[in-house]
Amino acid sequence: MTRWLPDIQQGRGPIYARIADQIEEAIGNGTLPAGTKLPPQRNLAFDIGVTIGTIGRAYHIVRERGLVSGEVGRGTYVLDHPESRPPEQSDPLTTSLAGTRPIVAPAGKLRFDSTAAPDIGQGEILARLLGDISHEHHADIASYARNFPDHWFEAGAQWLARGGFRPEVERIVPTLGAHAAVIAVISAVTSPGDRVAFETLTYSQVSRSAGLIGRRIALMESDEFGLVPEDFERVCAQQHPKLAFLMPSAQNPTVAIMPLDRRLAIADIARRYGVWLIEDDLYGSMTGDPVPALAEIAPERTFLVGGLSKSVAAGVRGGWVACPPHFSQRIRISHKMISGGLPFLLAELCARLVLSGAAAALRSRSVEEIGARETMARDIFSGFEFSSHPRVPFLWLKLPDPWLSGTFKQAALQEGVLIDDEDEFKAGRADRVFHRIRVGFSSAAERSEVGRGFQVLRRLLDSGRAGYDSFD
């Protein structure tokens, strides 16, 4: 066993990524030759002053790169053929942009790290509609979508409607999914160097994307009811963000639903400080939340984003954004420049799904299936603290002591289940630790698979750290 130690002050990105990169470098220059046993994770964590979870992530990365292998009871050893690894996975910037999820998900694992719409037989409906479109629009599907028919906008207005609120058709922009819509808005209303405000825990792929295009990140505090208005005002006064990204209904990952008084307060603060708002309603549209949307309370500054990925079919990449007055053309152009344009086939498919009523029917069936799975979660995880909603495809589970979020994620992976640790949802560096994981349960094909995965996680929770062998 070697006494090699990494220098965590060197390199870029999270500490676990720096350690992984230094292991790779040491293997490449011969400091760690083939057959060398790496230091035990507990020993290395103690020697360099980090958590065992950090070392576990680093070792996981180098295993993913094909540099080492680990065996229970034997340890982690350098392999003979490091050149066989995919070269693009060795880039630390790529690793940092990917978050805590593996760049390529390992095969044969139960995916509880995704919340795509469950399989409820969409394939037959999609196949029929695609056949109709191909038959009716030979020329259109063979070329660029240069002309957007009126019904694409009507579909967006219909899908984004909730309660008594329905956005005006002329304010709608069809997009290549909700993520593309959000990035198009950020690109259109902010400039490089501007600050974009995010809750500390959020859908962090947006914050990472915003950083990639030169925007700076401001962090806002939340509680069990969502964004805290007083902290939003503090950030506005001190850091002057140009825009804030929010999920008032079924916030990801906390499942929080913001009450009306907070929405009114946030709208008022945004008006006083001249801050634009992006309201991500992907999950909110599934909840039946009766509280008015921010887009209804402050339509002059709110961009309402929705889509089909969580409740209908993720693969069709259907999304829309309802813009404040006079912004639809700017967002449409920004979306084209960011995404390369909207494929006719997908845009027409999404419009037909909505206008035919098929999307609403599929959403109802998805919500029913999600409700059955959430009921299973409440039963299997009884006695543990977690947040969930009967119409939302994930839960936010607090880990019992002494589990750490990253260590539990690694333990679940060894048992064949992919979950998300809390760091996956941190929009930036934050001191606060939540000791929670997000468990998405919509992607598994069958309820029996969901139940099996829940039971695996329950056994780990019950056994504590004693039930986890980190290969060392």
Image: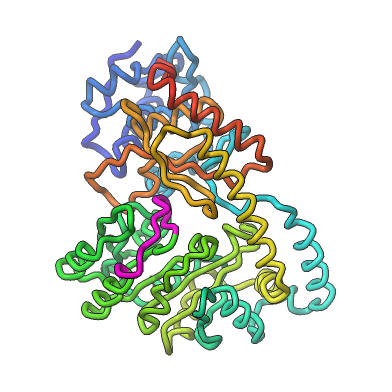
Q: Is residue 254 magenta?
A: yes
In this orientation, which residue lies closer to the viewer: 383 or 116?
383
Q: Quadrant of residue 2?
A: top left
* Identity of the residue drawn at 51% across and 63% down: 282
Give the position of the N terminus as an image quadrant: top left
* Identity of the residue drawn at 53% across and 79% down: 173
Q: Quadrant of residue 286?
A: bottom right
Q: Residue furthest right?
A: 135
Left or right of 6, for residue 34: right
Count how many numbered circles sit on residues in the image: 0
* Identity of the residue drawn at 82% across and 67% down: 131
In this orientation, which residue lies closer to the viewer: 346 or 111?
111
Give the position of the C terminus as an image quadrant: top left
| Residue 96, position as x, y percentages in the image | 38, 46
In this orientation, which residue lies closer to the viewer: 90 or 202?
202
Q: Which residues are magenta?
A: 250-262
In this orientation, which residue lies closer to the viewer: 77 or 400?
400
* Image colouring: rainbow
Left or right of 258, for residue 268: left
Q: Is residue 176 magenta?
A: no
| Residue 183, position as x, y percentages in the image | 44, 67
| Residue 155, position as x, y percentages in the image | 63, 78
Rendered position, 186 above or below 66: below
Does the rendering let one see residue 82?
Answer: no
Rendered position, 135 above or below 408: below
Q: Main secondary structure of the magenta part?
A: loop
| Residue 285, position as x, y percentages in the image | 52, 65
* Identity of the residue drawn at 30% across and 69% down: 261
Does the rendering let one see residue 251?
Answer: yes
Left or right of 133, for residue 283: left
